[in-house]
Each structure stands twice: as C-alpha cells, then as structure tokens.
Amino acid sequence: MIPCAVLSKRCARSTALTSLAAILQELASEHSTCPSGKNGGSLGEFSPGQMVKEFNDVVFTTGKVGQVEGPVKTQFGYHLILITRRGDEKM
C-alpha cells in the first residue's frame, strides 16, 4: 500500500512535469528556429552518439530524467533539454 502523502506528492510532481513539458512545447513551437520546433521541440528517441557532443553529454551523462537541463550551447544555438526517458527510467 502506498501512503497517501507519498501518492499525493508523486501526483503533484507528475502534474508539474506535465505542465512544464507543455510549456516547453509551446515555447519551442513559437520560438525555435530548428526543424524540431514544428514538433514542439521534441527530438523523439535517439541513441548515444547521434547528437552533437554537448547535447549528447547532457542527455546521456550529466542530465537527470524529469529535470530541465540548460541552457546548453551547441553549434546550432542554445537549448533547454527536458529528458523524458532514458532506458527504463521515465518521468
């Protein structure tokens, strides 16, 4: 059985992360100059080594699932990165 306080905290966090993801999608759609802006900034799934080093390092090494990382500067500009899933770990 999950204690009510734990469940309540988890639901609040989940709602906050869902809201954050929606805000980032809206901002990317409005302001991004990259092709991914049309998809709300989503890059979909990718494997280590498929992105530029700065991006790859954050997504696969230093970044945490469910947290906004950045701004991260790459040759393409500055990025805010929300890691929604890595392996079995999900937001």
Image (cartoon, grey):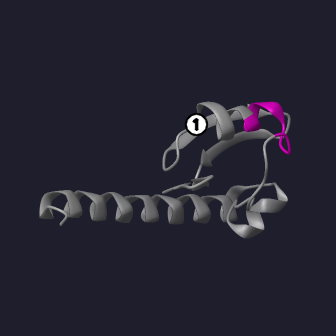
Residue drawn at (60%, 59%) of the image: 27
14 within the magenta span? no
Provide residue 11's location: percent of width, then percent of height.
29, 65
Query: Which of 20 and 87 lies nearest the eye of the viewer?
Result: 87
Provide residue 5's location: percent of width, then percent of height.
14, 58
Residue furthest front as drawn: 1
Provide residue 78's location: percent of width, then percent of height.
71, 38
Query: Which of 75 and 84 lies nearest the eye of the viewer?
Result: 84
Secondary-structure class at tag 1: loop
Numbered range of the magenta stretch: 49-56
Task: Identify which amino acid the numbered label 1 is placed on.
Answer: Gly
Provide residue 43's location: percent of width, then percent of height.
75, 58
Quarter of the image that includes the N terminus = bottom left
Q: Does 25 sit left or right of 2 as displayed?
A: right
51 within the magenta span? yes
Is disc 1 surrounded by few (<14), some (14 to 19) or many (20+) residues within 10 Å? some
Residue furthest left as drawn: 4
Residue drawn at (67%, 63%) of the image: 30
Query: Which of 84 and 23 lies nearest the eye of the viewer?
Result: 84
Q: Badge 1 is on which residue?
A: 63
Residue drawn at (79%, 42%) of the image: 48
Q: Does 78 sit left or right of 8 as displayed?
A: right
Q: Does 87 sit left or right of 74 as displayed?
A: left
Residue drawn at (29%, 59%) of the image: 10
Image height of 70 relative to 28, above or below: above
Quadrant in which residue 28 is drawn: bottom right
